[in-house]
Image: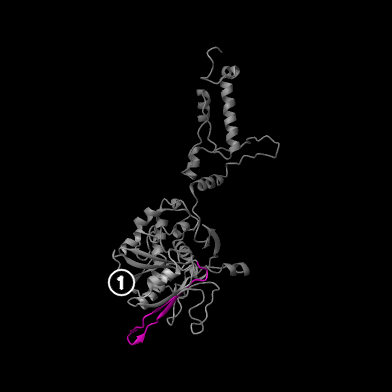
Amino acid sequence: MPELPEVERQLRKLDRVATGRTIASIDAQHDPIVFANTTAAEFTTALTHCTFVACHRYGKWMYCEMREPEARPDGSLLFVFIHLGMTGSLRIKGLGNTEYRTGKIAYADEAEEWPPRYWRFHLRLTETTVRDAALPSEMALSDPRRLGKVMLVRAADRDALFSVSPLMGLGFDPLLAMPNADEYVSAIRFRAAAIKSVLLDQSFAAGVGNWMADEILYQARVHPQSRPTDLSTRDLVATHTALATVVTDACGVDGDSDAYPADWLFHVRWDKRRQRSADAPVTCALGHPVEFVTVGGRTSAVVPAVQSVVLDRKARRSAAEEDRSDISVVDDGQPGDDPTITDRATVSAVDLMAVDPMYTTPTAVESDSENAVDQQQQEPVTPRRSSARVSLKRAAAATTVATESPRLVDEGVPPRKRSRHS
């Protein structure tokens, strides 16, 4: 999918060719999927003889302000929005194709086939020259998988666009409106999803896609499955720095992937198929193996040697208990055997809290017998290992209560609930 740098690259070409020029004619193919809030016929009628005033981008959306032949009585302005989806491409005849990684999609040479294959709309601009050189006059939106979107939106001005679809609800644009580190950390710290899923959420950061998220987290040395709630402030600031760096560097070379820094994970993250078919693993620029995992339903490239998973609180507590060599696991035995608590060394709550600060002492079994409670408080605390062990501990406490208060047990009536006639 075209991500922010690729969309920015196409926007710059569109702006250079189209701004200030009028659409002489336009053809559009009927496609209710691509034309989201309009039809091909309405799109053609609305844009014919309109002039491109300015071209903009926010997130993965390109949008152009159009000047209509006749002004609207209400003074509203017309904007055309374009989203490239998974495989969309804005192709300008004579200017070179705006390519990115599109898998096996192949286009014929412009001299052999124009409009290009999979075109959804094709327009011709009025002739013009710049420094005695004729600018390209034809462009087309091509979209093989038909996952792109074309919309017509009316608004009072450009600022009003952010209160209506499709820009309404989008998060910050890392190139146009990058928040400072404090604002970024405050916005992401309490997100419970995996951090890669958060970065891919367009309501958080508009324009970030799959390869960008992988690159950001690799450079920040953060595993994509880690949750922001479990990361330190230093880790979160590192992702903020990496996000700004990746966007700035990628757009600085006009989204040309061949010009991205040689040490970027980008250059090897596409080699998952090669890893399956070759004996030698895919490695990053540091020489470490690259693994591929699924996060939020998306394939993710990760380098475990420099990106370790930060466990959540429950997992950290479990790992801390497992590391205690003097704590044995309750053996529930074979089917039919009575589970028993075997002899084991015990550990005090102070010792366990030293290993895991988030550990809390198990609550003592409530009892009406002060002697039973005192006895439990004097005994060393053993961390709970399983539901079976908790049940056994409660059973033992109940036995102690029975021993300390034989009269209540013999009567068979719980305390505070005996009948006045018993």
User: Looking at the image, which residue sits at the far bottom?
Assistant: 132
Q: Quadrant of the C terminus?
A: top right
What segment carries the magenta color? 122-146
Q: Residue 364: x and y, percent?
A: 51, 31
Q: Residue 83: x and y, percent?
A: 44, 67
> Is 416 placed above or below 393 here?
above
> Depth check: 343 or 407 in front?
407
Locate residue 106 relative to residue 24 in the image: left or right: right
Residue at 53% across / 25% down in the picture?
372
The stretch drawn in magenta includes residue 51: no
How many dots with numbers?
A: 1
> Is 92 placed above or below 367 here?
below
For residue 388, which quarter of the picture?
Answer: top right
Residue at 54% across / 44% down in the picture?
321
Locate residue 379 relative to residue 161 in the image: left or right: right
> Is 182 placed above or below 266 here?
above
Q: Residue 301: x and y, percent?
A: 52, 63
Residue matched to label 1: 70
SS category of the residue bearing label 1: loop
Residue at 57% across / 35% down in the picture?
390
Residue 90 showing in the rendered view: no
Q: Count neighbours of disc 1 (C-alpha within 10 A) and say few if under 14, some if 14 to 19, many if 20 or more.
A: few
> Depth check: 298 or 82 in front?
82
Residue 81 showing in the rendered view: yes
Say what amino acid the circle numbered 1 marks: Glu
